[in-house]
Image (cartoon, helix red, strand yellow):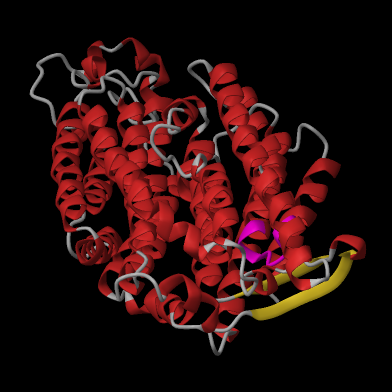
């Protein structure tokens, strides 16, 4: 059933391309219905999974028999978490893109193609098929930014594409080497992820192929010092593009690190464990520190994503069950919270004020003129800080506990990132919405964009935006209060035979 998340997304692309160019409203409705259908299938398929600790095959048919490749779609609990995240992010992104007027059908066609590729990555248990879907996401990412973005959009799109291709080539080299060595070890060709995870690759081979594949995927996850595409890409992307980049695309990299690099080369992970953790902690502290001094509102959220993704990578490096479960939970949490923050900055603020500069925003009294945007940012901001009651608290707590068991010094250092995150969120909150500056919005040059209410210089927050914000806030609160809803999917996976080789050498 979960395979229909992919099929529905690409069917939606075909339907959109058949629409006449002027049918903007129809394009929006079709895109929204497609995203809702995909999300409904994701939830229904997840509920049908009786044992999330097992890899349940959805469809498996031969694809390239000579290579041992098959169209192999399957799911376990970790896949379910990320498929559900993708469904929620897809709906929210469309709601926050309801104002797109320029080439509307093409925008939503690229958007749904990206969503379909993301679903494909999370459900692929053939490493070649996973790689194909992974590559497929690069094309719509590029065009969404280059065509509908802002602020050096061509530069941002090209930088993201180049970083993605470099990472992909590293992964491809590693996968080719893996196939050759596995064939020599087992006597037959196979690209099945579960079968490859059982192959005893030589230690010398794992020592060099693991960092090749891990870094190749981790580039897209924002690993320092390969993170520079992320803030630039986030800022250049349209609102929905930023939401998807932070919400699900960065998760593709982290998922590849866990599902491919770490599962196939468990001894290689242990050889490079400390280095991964060190880079993750640098990313946490560096991203938070740079976010603290930004003058561009969107760059604050862009660098905060680098910092929060550092917690995912730190959790992966712990090699214990609580740290890994925290990493997967942080993937979901960051996807929801970062998506909401980008929606506030990009759609609610920038599309109305046409500026992201704090020097301009702090004179507009947006907390009074756009109260829904202000309140939403406050709630999303405290969730990003790790406030109890939101999903971020549970996720980061588990990562820190897991890190403390394995490398306590790094756990303490990573805690500095949380402290700095409080500072940059409060600073952004004050400057953008609740500044005491005397100059009011009535003096702002953008007052020609007035809404229907007399004296209000900005159009009011629309109903699609309100629904999108409430959807993401509700998801964060529900998981913050009832984390077992996702942990009951994640933890059985980590206790399964598939992860046994990975975890047996870590601190338990």
Examine the rendering and report whether any part of residue 439 can be seen: yes
Horizontal relation, residue 187 to residue 181: left or right: right
Prevailing secondary structure of the magenta residues:
helix
In this rendering, is residue 141 above or below 491?
above
Residue at left offset 20%, top offset 38%: 425
Q: Could you say where residue 250 lies in the image, as x and y percent from the top left?
A: 49, 46
Examine the rendering and report whether any part of residue 96 can be seen: no
The answer to whether residue 433 is magenta is: no
- Furthest-bottom residue in this view: 50
Q: Could you say where residue 107 lies in the image, as x and y percent from the top left?
A: 67, 36
Quadrant of the rendered image containing residue 343: top left
Horizontal relation, residue 502 to residue 412: left or right: right
Image label count: 0
The C terminus lies in which quarter of the figure? bottom left
Q: Nearer the viewer, residue 465 or 303?
A: 303
In this rendering, is residue 220 above or below 148?
below
In this rendering, is residue 473 above or below 112?
below
Q: Could you say where residue 457 lies in the image, as x and y percent from the top left?
A: 32, 22
The N terminus lies in which quarter of the figure? bottom right
Q: Could you say where residue 342 lies in the image, as x and y percent from the top left?
A: 39, 39
Residue at left offset 52%, top offset 30%: 237
Q: Nearer the viewer, residue 244 or 398?
A: 398
Quadrant of the rendered image containing residue 125: bottom right
Residue at left offset 64%, top offset 41%: 168
Horizontal relation, residue 279 to residue 164: left or right: left
Q: Nearer the viewer, residue 200 or 174?
A: 200
Magenta segment, which residues? 121-128
In this rendering, is residue 32 above or below 388?
above
Residue at left offset 77%, top offset 64%: 184
The answer to whether residue 126 is magenta is: yes
């Amino acid at each position: 059933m979960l395979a229909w998340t992919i099929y529905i997304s690409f069917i939606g692309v075909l339907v959109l391309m058949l629409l006449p160019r002027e049918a903007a409203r129809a394009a929006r409705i079709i895109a929204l219905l497609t995203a809702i259908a995909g999300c409904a299938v994701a939830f229904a398929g997840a509920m049908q999974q009786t044992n999330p600790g097992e890899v349940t095959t959805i469809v498996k048919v031969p694809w390239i028999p000579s290579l041992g490749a098959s169209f192999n779609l399957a799911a376990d609990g970790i896949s379910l978490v990320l498929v559900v995240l993708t469904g929620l992010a897809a709906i929210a992104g469309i709601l926050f893109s309801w104002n797109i007027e320029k080439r509307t059908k093409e925008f939503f066609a690229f958007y749904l193609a990206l969503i379909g590729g993301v679903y494909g990555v999370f459900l692929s248990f053939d490493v070649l098929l996973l790689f194909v879907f992974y590559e497929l996401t690069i094309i719509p990412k590029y065009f969404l930014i280059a065509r509908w973005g802002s602020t050096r959009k061509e530069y941002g799109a090209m930088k993201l594409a180049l970083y993605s291709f470099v990472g992909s080539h590293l992964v491809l080299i590693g996968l080719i080497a893996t196939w050759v060595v596995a064939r020599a070890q087992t006597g037959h060709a196979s690209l099945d992820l579960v079968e490859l995870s059982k192959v005893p690759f030589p230690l010398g081979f794992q020592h060099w192929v693991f960092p090749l594949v891990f870094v190749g995927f981790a580039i897209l996850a924002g690993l320092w010092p390969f993170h520079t595409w992320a803030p630039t890409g986030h800022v250049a992307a349209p609102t929905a593009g930023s939401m998807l980049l932070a919400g699900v695309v960065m998760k593709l990299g982290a998922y590849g690190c866990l599902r491919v690099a770490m599962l196939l080369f468990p001894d290689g992970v242990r050889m490079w464990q400390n280095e991964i953790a060190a880079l993750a902690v640098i990313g946490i502290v560096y991203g938070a520190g740079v976010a603290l001094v930004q003058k561009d509102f969107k760059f604050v959220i862009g660098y905060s994503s680098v910092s929060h993704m550092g917690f995912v990578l730190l959790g992966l490096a712990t090699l214990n069950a609580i740290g890994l479960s925290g990493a997967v939970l942080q993937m979901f949490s960051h996807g929801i919270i970062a998506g909401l923050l980008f929606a506030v900055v990009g759609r609610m603020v920038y599309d109305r004020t046409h500026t992201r500069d704090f020097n301009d925003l702090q004179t507009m009294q947006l907390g009074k003129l756009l109260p829904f945007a202000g309140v939403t940012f406050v709630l999303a901001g405290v969730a990003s800080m790790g406030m109890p009651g939101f999903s971020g608290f549970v996720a980061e707590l588990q990562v820190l506990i897991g890190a403390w068991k394995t490398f306590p010094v790094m756990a303490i250092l990573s805690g500095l990132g949380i402290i700095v995150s409080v500072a940059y969120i409060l600073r952004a909150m004050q400057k953008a919405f609740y500044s005491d500056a005397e100059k009011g919005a009535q003096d702002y040059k953008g007052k020609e964009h007035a809404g229907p209410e007399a004296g209000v210089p900005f159009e009011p927050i629309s109903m699609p935006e309100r629904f999108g914000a409430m959807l993401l806030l509700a998801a964060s609160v529900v998981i913050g209060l009832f984390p077992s809803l996702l942990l009951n999917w994640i933890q059985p996976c980590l206790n399964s035979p598939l992860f046994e080789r990975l975890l047996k050498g870590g601190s338990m």
